[in-house]
């Protein structure tokens, strides 16, 4: 992990032993302490961390404030919370709800947020929003669906296609330009906020 490579003390917490085993086999696990625990009941003292980060987690909690209160507890005063979640106005959300309806969604129960609803949730749990960000899926959702379909018939495409070359680079250049516009946050797959503990 980049933080540990830069001298940070990094803990990775997951309630799944299998996930931790997969991480342990990764070369990125060097100098990372793996913890088996529930994120709503962390085995850490109050005011322990400078930064807490989770991506793809908050949206799976029917009561997200429980997780955010625990994040608040273990952060030092002025510490930073980075939260990354699915954004409401995206094709991903439409597909997800159709698959949820038919009981075919791979990721269990899941909600989504707008940048405003996420900011209000953080504020309610004593975080000040400092910075908003978002990103489209890389590679794109269409490519991911195509890749999954082809895998079922024995054709494996790379996770990150490089053979589109200039087209991919041009698309990322446009994304980086749009990133400066607030409307961008209503078009992306995932959004995030960096919040500070009050």
Image (cartoon, rainbow, N blue to C red):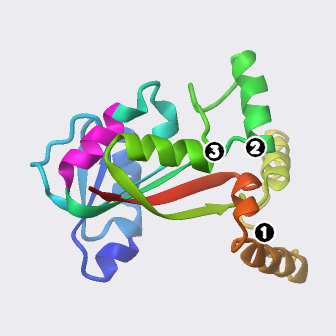
State if disc 2 and disc 1 touch (CB < 8 Å): no
Magenta residue check for 32: no
| Sequence order check, earlier mark of 2 and 3 | 2
State the image quarter where residue 171 is shown. Answer: bottom right
Q: Residue at x 73, y 53 (%)?
A: 186
At mark 3, the secondary structure is loop
Q: Which span of residues is magenta-colored? A: 66-75
**Mark 2 vs mark 3, CA separation in Å:** 8 Å
| Residue marked by disc 1 | 161
| 94 sits left or right of 124 in the view | right
State if disc 3 and disc 2 touch (CB < 8 Å): yes
Is 28 or 99 nearer to us in this picture?
Answer: 99
| Sequence order check, earlier mark of 1 and 2 | 2
Residue 163, above or below 113: below
Number of numbered callouts drawn? 3
Which of label 1 and label 2 is nearer to you? 2
Q: In which quarter of the image is the N terminus?
A: bottom left
Where is residue 127 shown, x and y percent of the image?
Answer: 35, 52
Q: Residue at x 88, y 83 (%)?
A: 166
Is residue 26 visible in the rendered image? The answer is yes
**Mark 1 vs mark 3, CA separation in Å:** 29 Å
| 142 sits left or right of 135 in the view | right
Is residue 17 visible in the rendered image? The answer is no
Q: Residue at x 78, y 68 (%)?
A: 161
At mark 2, the secondary structure is loop
At mark 1, the secondary structure is loop
| Residue marked by disc 3 | 114
| Residue marked by disc 2 | 89
Where is residue 141 shown, x and y percent of the image?
Answer: 79, 51
Magenta residue check for 73: yes
């Amino acid at each position: 992990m980049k933080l540990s490579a830069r001298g940070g003390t990094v803990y990775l917490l997951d309630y799944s032993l299998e996930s931790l085993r997969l991480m342990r086999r990764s070369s990125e696990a060097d100098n990372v302490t793996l913890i088996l625990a529930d994120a709503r009941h962390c085995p850490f003292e109050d005011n322990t961390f400078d930064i807490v980060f989770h991506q793809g987690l908050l949206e799976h909690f029917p009561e997200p404030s429980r997780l955010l209160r625990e994040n608040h507890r273990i952060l030092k005063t002025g510490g930073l919370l980075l939260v990354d979640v699915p954004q409401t106005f995206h094709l991903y959300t439409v597909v997800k709800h159709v698959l949820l309806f038919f009981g075919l969604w791979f990721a269990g129960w899941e909600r989504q947020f707008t940048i405003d609803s996420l900011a209000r949730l953080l504020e309610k749990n004593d975080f000040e929003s400092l910075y908003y960000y978002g990103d489209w899926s890389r590679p794109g959702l269409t490519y991911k669906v195509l890749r999954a379909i082809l895998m079922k018939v024995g054709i494996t495409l790379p996770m990150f296609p490089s053979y589109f070359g200039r087209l991919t680079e041009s698309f990322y250049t446009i994304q980086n330009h749009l990133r400066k516009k607030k409307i961008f946050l209503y078009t992306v797959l995932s959004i995030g906020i960096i919040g500070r503990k009050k």
